[in-house]
Image (cartoon, rainbow, N blue to C red):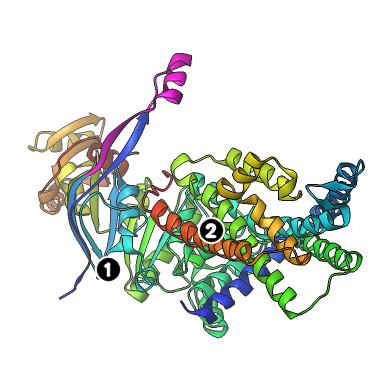
Amino acid sequence: MVQNIIDVRNLSKSFDISFKEPGLKGTIQHFLNRQTKSLKVIKEISFAIKEGEIVGFLGANGAGKTTILKMLCGLIYPSEGSILVAGHLPFRRKENFLKNITLIMGQKQQLIWDLPPIESFYLNASIYDLDKFEAKKRIKKLSEMLEIDDELFIPVRKLSLGQRMKSELLAALIHEPNILFLDEPTLGLDINAQRNLRKFLQKYNKETNATICLTSHYMKDITSLCKRVICVHEGAISYDGKLNQLLKRLSPVKEILIVCRSEKDATKLESSGFTIKNRINNEITIKIENSSITSSLKTILNNFDIEDLFINEPPVDEIIGKVLIKKDYEI
Amino acid sequence: MNLRKYLKVYKKFLHTSLASELEYKTNILVDLITAILSLIGSIFLLSIFFQNNGYIGGWKFEQALIIQGIYTILNGITNTWFNPNLTEIVKHIREGTLDFVLLKPIDSQFFISLKKLNPSGFLEILLGFFLLFFCIRINQINVNLSFLTLSLITISCSICILYSLWFFISTTTIWFVKTWNAIEVLRSFLYIGRFPLNSFSFSLRIFFSVFIPIAFITTIPSEVFLGLSQLWKILLEVIVATVFLISSRKFWLFALKFYSSASS
């Protein structure tokens, strides 16, 4: 049985936030007598993640995804509850724990700006106590997987965003961590760079069985990498389960555009009992429940003269968008 | 602590810092010229103070030059290590890149205190030593083992006090986020270290000995050079340096508990 590598129970986090009224009066008041209020940004959440799982954390801006990730990797002390990551209490930041994890943030970088990435890789290798031979071997392997070669020797400031992100990944993975925390890793990347990064993460997960916790606002990252998602709404978990189950639940019907050979066939299909969305000449759009899609399509193909048909799935962004603004999607 | 690993990492820090700085040749040249001009300016200013009766606080110009020499070495160390690293703490905290430091299996204080290096500060350190050698000759100082040992101890203590003061202020960034002004105030106070402690009024002497121990930093090592030092003063400097160093460490570990990281 696969072990839980991350175990979170009744975790809460509160921050003291200061508030400021607008205008000069508010500014003076804020300067002289700063009013702070304790804000509970994470509210008693519990979940467990198994070794080798890729889990996507979904939520609107400010929902608390990054705070959860930062508590999991030990950067922020939790206010209440318990976290166990690979058998360690993360906030103690013990050496053995730190050698097991990595954090990659799409909007922040650790590479030395004026030097080629290779210099940062060797610096990280020395911090993780790797000898030169081992470091060289790992850099070669990862650079092949990430398809970066010449870029290793060009100053970071001259690299494109995509090349920089690949280099950031290499720097963060040189110690071969078992748990990866990725905070919007594809932020600002073009479509090809996003796809390459996703391909790399899939390959890395497959080859090393690493556990990946990911936050992203790009739904393609979530749909192509994560089987399981945890939806966070105002600091609480609104859904924790399989992504396809969530999609099925939120979008129980599919729309099928059927192009009939003649208007006569279209009329026949229209009166055959399917739920019709609309009809334009010999083109009919019908709605079919996900559960009966195979049998319905069989019936249509066997009984009607069909020229072509298209299955239209509603965009995932649209479906997930519904989750981000609602409180409870438990299944 | 694995000393071999830390030495290896420091070697890498030196290498990457030098390589980064050497990317900008003109900047290094300007820094070197600034260091030379700054030393000439300081000696000129000092000579003006001594023009009237040749003494300040009981110190002759030749003796006060020792203080200037030690100040130049300490300023060189500040510009080589403290300034590039400890001002960076503010940036790390404001931009949230301290996250990367805290997640490395290495002591975070070691990392943020020594990662960078400004090689142009070396010239200042070298100029300071030249000035000290010159002072040893003109003041006819007898160089023996006890002199060398006591000089080394007191100058090392001065470096520790200076580092701790910088580090304390930089650490407060975790709560106050912006502390540039406090660092500028500290730098201004450091200028005071170019003059003998006795040249100030009694109240200022107390202030610069107890509250901000700038006086310890230059005056006590200079007294060792002139054979005027008393054992209790040297012991006091060692105690102050140890207390400051330990406190800075404890303060850093305490402050990290309040680190909330920058939002993404």
**Chain letter of disc 1 in the image:** A
Residue under pointer 1: A88
Q: Is residue A26 magenta?
A: yes
Vertical relation: B136 (above or below) A276: below
- The foreground one among A237 and A239 is A237
Is B187 displayed left or right of B108 in the figure? Answer: right
Q: Residue at x 42, y 63 (%)?
A: A199
Instruction: Find numbered disc 1 in the image and state the secondary structure of the residue it sits on.
Output: loop
Q: Amino acid at mark 2?
A: Gln
Where is residue B6 drawn, in percent x and y? Answer: 54, 75
Q: Residue at x 73, y 66 (%)?
A: B224
Q: Is residue A149 magenta?
A: no
Residue under pointer 2: A110
Where is residue A288 drawn, in percent x and y? Answer: 14, 43
- Rounded to the nearest angstrom, the CA distance separating label 2 from label 1 is 25 Å
Residue B260 in sight: yes
**Chain letter of disc 2 in the image:** A
Where is residue B195 drawn, in percent x and y? Answer: 76, 48
